[in-house]
Amino acid sequence: MTTGTRATGGRGPRSVGLRVRLTAAFTAVALFAALLASGISYVLLRRLMLQRAQDAVLTEVRDTLARQIPPQLPPDVDELVRAQLVEALSGAGRRAAAVPVPLSGPVPLPDPSQLDVPVTRAFADRARDGLVFQRIIRGGKPYLLVGARATGYQTTVDEPWRTTPPMVFVSASLSREAADLRLFTRALLVADAVALVAALGLALLATGGVLRPVRRLGAAARALGAGELETRVAVRGGDELADLARTFNATAEALERTVTELRAMEAASRRFVADVSHELRTPLTSMVAMTDLLAEEAAAAGGGTAARLVAGETRRLGQLVEHLIEISRFDAGAAALVLDDVNVADAVAATLRARGWRDEVVVDGPPDLFARLDPRRFDVIVANLAGNALKHGRPPVALRFGRAGRDGAAGVEVVVSDHGPGLPGDLLAVVFDRFVKSEAARSRSEGSGLGLSIARENAVLHGGSLDAANAPDGGAVFTLWLPEKQDDEEMDEEKRDDVEQDDVERDGAS
């Protein structure tokens, strides 16, 4: 049996719902089976009890008629014979009546007071030809009504006014059978209730045994999704759930192996980019200085087109290296904030003034707005947004800032807009991706394609957001939101030294 790290987790809504459904289905099947068995038992027993009571009454009527009526009857059977029949057929729970039957004409009906149930004309006519019976409910009580007439007898005188053998009617109470059936019904209901409780208990036990492995698999899957790639589940038994657990373990093992390889490759590529960028920074700094000097000397001599081109391309290469170094810091998780209380208006003005954009961007915002930000990273964000609007949009370019809350948190919002063609539809969703350029069809263009990506990373590092959209009247709109107050992040000594070294090197390169 394969064992491994057992992942545990809380019972989720899906497992609870599945347990309820399985329990309900198991209980419903058990209840249906119990009710079906009870119904069949009730029907069979009722038929047996009624048939037994009915057969007893019918047999009694036949035997009494055979005993009391002789084969040869005298004309006009007298009242004595009918009285003897009534006395013989009456008893516990039974009442009887005997009526004379003429040779022709309708059969007279008995007095209603003689029987428990009335006799209809149709029933009496059917009883003329033999033994008939009918179950009747009267006053909420069941009765068996029997009508019979002795047949095969001849009267001594064949005259119309003479009578034939009399007809008897017997009403037998079925109350005892009904009471027995009620008692049996109560016993069935009690048995069904006990069966329902037992089925519910068995269902809970059965579903618990089924769902425990499912919950373990669910908890392991959640742990695997959270990045705990060493998670495995214990395999018990040889059923389908055990096969599922083995499949999960094999999948987790393959996933762990693949992710480990991918992480190693990604880390190697990040180290390569970071190392190359750092190695290129120093010679590029010297090259920028030298090419600028050569361009100035060539310009003084009346030429210098090639020198200026080389100087421009060298500066562009230096900017790309700086961006790659910054991106590598974000990927390595080494980027950290150095927070300070910043006057937003002064910070925006300083950014635009340092790049010569003061007269090209219309700024609107309160002069006394302070926020706790990283000044250097805020400068990078604003410079990227404003520079992007100036390069790819059309004037006027506007920069508005002010207080704005999101999700109950106070913050600062900076909106940069232009009046250019706006962002293409296919570019809007990926504008913050790395190496995405608005002029993607060209083999090369100004910029590294990393500026907006770095801007968003800096916004997220502050706990804020950066969004892009198109204005209804044309032009692109970039909205930056940063929380107004943030907790100072503790930087370890190595990170702080790296930040300070980056600042020194960047100042020397500029």
Image: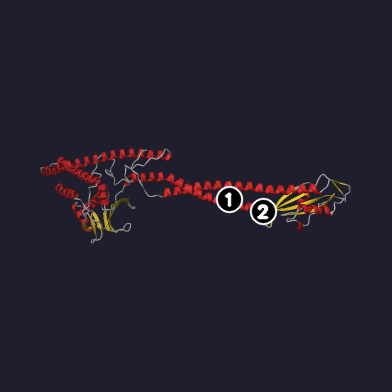
Q: Residue at x 56, y 52 (%)?
A: 190
On the picture, is 448 further left or further right than 90? left
Label 1: few (<14), some (14–19) or many (≥20) C-alpha neighbours in 10 Å:
some
Q: Which residue is mark 1?
A: 188
SS class, disc 2: helix
Foreground pick, 487 / 107: 107
* Residue 343 - label: none
Foreground pick, 491 / 222: 222
Q: Where is the N terminus found, in terms of image quarters? A: top left
Viewer-side label of 1, 2:
2
Instruction: Please state the horizontal and vertical placement of residue 114, each as a whole percent of the image.
Output: 76, 57
On the picture, is 464 further left or further right than 160? left
SS class, disc 1: helix
Label 2: few (<14), some (14–19) or many (≥20) C-alpha neighbours in 10 Å:
few
Q: Amino acid at mark 2?
A: Arg
Q: Residue at x 64, y 54 (%)?
A: 179
Q: Which residue is mark 2?
A: 176
| Residue 49 showing in the rendered view | yes
